[in-house]
Image (tube, helix red, strand yellow):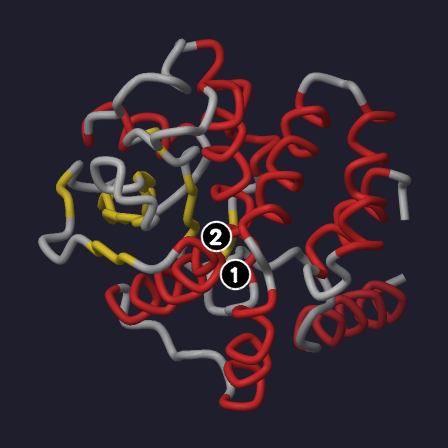
Amino acid sequence: MRRMRAVVLALVLIVLAVPGRGFAQEDRRPGIAIFPFEDGGWVGMVAEDRRALGVGLQQLLLTQLSQNTNLRIVERNALRPILEEQDSGRTRMDPQTAARIGRIVGARYVILASFSDYAGSNRPGVTGRIVDVETSEVRPNARNLRGNRDELFELVVELSRQLTAELQLPPLPEAQRQQEDTRAPQVPDEAITLFSRAQVFEDVGRSAQAEQLYEQIIERFPQMTEASTALRKLRGG
């Protein structure tokens, strides 16, 4: 009996000593949550499309940041019910409330972002602020980027890089950065608008309409790979 116990104990110690085996290891990467982009106004764009754009840009920024394996991303599906419950999704978010929600979803940082066309100039701009969930304080270096009409996707890519630098995380590999630089100018604002509508359709359970829009994007704007990824996920792939 003693020999059997000794053998069992030895096996347990071996299993625990092997990396990735035994008890699940805690993910110590800093979690980050991205709230829907606030609507700073866009002349000529209807309110429904502006609301959708806030969601679409949220997902695009989330996708960009998720490429950095040094971060643990809080998915939109985990964040959305809390925002809806607190009726905070369409109001200006203060850092204290953002930090409180961030703690609920296990985030270390919260990104508060917004978009606008800068007083009717038809030149898009995006801003991004980092809220430290532990202190409820906003990092002092807010990001404020502007571009031309068809540079909205590029602005999101650049915003993700600047936020990564502000968090003092290693950047993406050079080859991956160059690939994004090549793709960014080829993603027009129309593709982003369609993608944003599809994301909202998904959120409200209108999967058929979302599929149609994703398929339209894939056919017309194949360089926007986020649409094909979203379609696969929607179909359970």
Residue bearing mark 2: 61
| The residue positioned farthest toward the bottom in the image shown | 174
Amino acid at dot 2: Leu
Question: What residue is at 55 percent from the left and 75 percent from the top?
Answer: 180
Q: Give the answer, above or below, for where 74 lies relative to 80.
A: below
Decide: few, some or many residues near mark 1? Use Cα within 10 Å; few <14, some 14-19, many ≥20.
some
Q: Quadrant of residue 90?
A: top left
| The residue positioned farthest toward the left in the image shown | 140
Residues at marks 2 and 1 touching, judged by CB atoms closer than 8 Å = yes
Question: What residue is at 67 percent from the left and 57 percent from the top?
Answer: 23
- Residue 84 in percent (x, y) is at 49, 13
On residue 207, the disc is none
Quadrant of image for the N terminus: bottom right
Q: Quadrant of residue 146?
A: bottom left
Residue bearing mark 1: 64
Q: Give the answer, above or below, for where 115 lies relative to 92.
A: below
Residue situated in front as seen by the camera: 72 or 50: 50
Question: What residue is at 26 percent from the left and 58 percent from the top?
Answer: 145
- Residue 20 in percent (x, y) is at 69, 70
- Residue 30 in percent (x, y) is at 40, 56
Could you tell me which secondary element the residue under label 1 belongs to? helix
Amino acid at dot 1: Gln
Residue situated in front as seen by the camera: 164 or 192: 192
Q: Give the answer, above or below, for where 111 lies relative to 65.
A: above
Question: What residue is at 52 percent from the left and 61 percent from the top?
Answer: 64
Apparent side of residue 189 relative to residue 203 in the rendered image (left or right): left
